[in-house]
Amino acid sequence: MIAEDKQKLREEIWQALDMKNLIRTSNTCFGKIPNFKGAYKAAMMLKNTFEWENSETVFSSPDSALFDVRKNALEDGKILIMATPKIKEGYLLIDPEEVLGQEKIASTIDGSFKYGEKIESFPQIDLVVEGSLAVDLKGNRLGKGGGFADQEIAYLLNERVINSDTAICTTVHPLQIVEDIITEEHDKKINMIVTPDKVIRINLNAVLEI
């Protein structure tokens, strides 16, 4: 029943984004993490936070919606750790000093394989950015159904390169923020939501917006 409810919410979000023409690079977002219109502005909102300013190493999922986040990280001289699609080939480290002038290419999936180095031992990570299909204001998120973000966050926790104080962020269109997401035991929470217009920080006791 939980799986059915999750899938129903996914389909509602996909349909709403498609019908309102809110996808920036394709005709449909069904089955995907939406590459939403406004993703660039959301990336710039994130860039102006103290979490971003204080980070030296940024982790990102490979979703297209986070292209601008990854590009900003490299342009700002931050080490970028990137998951490969479906984590099939593990994780890549991209050194900003090795991609000067090529940050745009290096921020793509193909470019990350060209410029990145496969790693198993991780540096400490200051900021995690995951793609999402939907989120709520309690820190719950919903992906496209593969569970990869949950696996990524769990791996980073197990490796002790992030902890409960680490900013775990997602960028979304406001339409992707919903009242409630049903969760399962393996689902990992986020503590920061960034839209094109606002930053929402979440903790156990309060939701703070700026």
Image: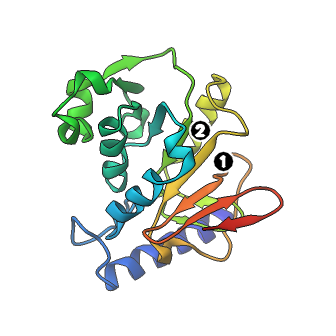
Q: How is the image coloured?
A: rainbow
Residue 72: percent from left, percent from top: 33, 45
Q: Quadrant of the N terminus?
A: bottom right
Q: Nearer the viewer, residue 160 or 187?
A: 160
> What residue sits 59% from the left and 46% below the top?
168
Label 1 Cα crowd, 10 Å radius (few <14 / some 14-19 / many 20+) = some
* Tag 2–tag 1 contact (CB < 8 Å): yes
> What residue sits 48% from the left and 30% below the top?
56
Q: Which residue is mark 2?
A: 153
Residue 68: percent from left, percent from top: 31, 51
Residue 169: percent from left, percent from top: 55, 51
Q: Quadrant of the C terminus?
A: bottom right
Q: Nearer the viewer, residue 19 or 66?
A: 66
> What residue sits 59% from the left and 44% below the top?
150
Residue type at mark 1 is: Lys
Label 2 Cα crowd, 10 Å radius (few <14 / some 14-19 / many 20+) = many
Residue type at mark 2 is: Ile
Q: Which mark is residue 167?
A: none
SS of the residue under disc 2: helix
- Against 58, residue 30 (above or below) is below
Q: Which residue is mark 1?
A: 188
SS of the residue under disc 1: loop
> What residue sits 36% from the left and 64% below the top?
41
Query: With 164 as the anchor, is 142 left or right in this view?
Result: left
Residue 39: percent from left, percent from top: 35, 63
